[in-house]
Amino acid sequence: MHTTPSARGASLSHEPDHPLIRTAGQGKGTRMSGTDLACSTGLTENSLYRYDDWLLRAAAIRDGDHVLDIGCGTGGTTRAAAWLAGSGAAVGVDLSEQTLAEATRRAEETGAVTATFVPADAQVHAFETETFDVLLSRTGCTDFTDPIAAFTNLARALRPGGRVALLVWQAPSRNPWYAELTTGATPSLDVPGAFAFADPARVAHILTSAGFHTPECESLQELIQVGPGVDYRSAAWLVTTRKPA
C-alpha cells in the first residue's frame, strides 16, 4: 500500500444541480442524522462534484470500456463514465429504486444513452463474470456489511487486469463537515458507514483479501459545497488497484 498527498484537483466542467440543503444566512443550518445524510442524494451530488475529476482520471476509462459504478446515486459519475467510454457503456448500481429513477431520467435528459441503471445490492448481486473493465465508486462502497465478500463478488465481475478507482472519506477529524451536518457520536472506522474506508491499512487488507493487487491511496483535499457560498474543508482517499491479469 502506498499513500501520497495531492494538491487540489482541476476544476470540473459541470456544477451541482440538486437542491441545496442549506441557504446562505442560515448559520449552522438544519442538522441531519447520519442516516439522513447518507440518503440525501442532493447533498451527495453537491458535496462531491469537486472530486469527480480525480476519480474519473484515476479510472483511466477508455473508448470501448465497460464500467460498473457502485452506489451510483443519481448517476452523475455513471453518465460521465459512459461518455468517457464512448462505444462502451456504464452501468450504475444502487439500492434505491427512487434514486435510480432520477438517475435514468437525467441520463435520458442529457443523452447519455449508454448509461443504464440496475437496482441491486452490489455485495451479492450475480453480475456476469468478467464483464467489466473498470470498477468505480464515489463513496458508494463504505456501507458494505462484509466488504471482503463484497469485493470478492465484484472482482468476479471484472475482466483480468480490470481497474478499480474508489473515492472514500478520510477520518472524521479531517472532515469537519460531518460534525457540522450530523448529530450523534463520531462513527467508528471499522463498521459500515461514511468512514469505514478511512484507514488505508484496512482498505489494503480488504482489497488484497478479495483478490486485488495492493492498492495505492492518494490523499486529496477539497472544499465540499453544501449551500450557496457555504463550503467545508474535506479530505478523501483516492484508492486505485487492479485485478491480476
Image (cartoon, helix red, strand yellow):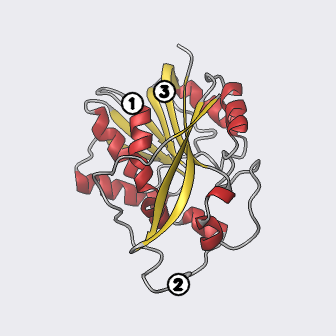
Q: Residues within 10 Å of mark 3 (few under 14, many from 20)?
A: many
Residue 91 visible (yes or no) = no
Circle 1: element type: loop
Q: Amino acid at mark 2?
A: Gly
Above or below: residue 4 compared with residue 191: above
| Residue placed under numbered mark 2 in the picture | 27
Quarter occupied by residue 176: bottom right
> In this rendering, which labeled residue sits more in front, label 2 or label 3?
2
Give how far across and how far down residue 40 sits, in percent: 52, 66
Circle nearer the N terminus (3, 1): 1
**Quadrant assignment for the N terminus:** top right
Residue 183 visible (yes or no) = yes
Cα–Cα gap, marks 1 and 2 = 40 Å
Residue at image position (44%, 34%) is 58
Q: Amino acid at mark 3?
A: Arg
Give how far across and how far down residue 75 sits, in percent: 40, 52
Quarter occupied by residue 57: top left
Circle 2: element type: loop
| Residue placed under numbered mark 1 in the picture | 60
Q: Amino acid at mark 1?
A: Ala
Above or below: residue 25 compared with residue 212: below
Circle nearer the N terminus (1, 2): 2
Give how far across and how far down residue 120 sits, in percent: 54, 46
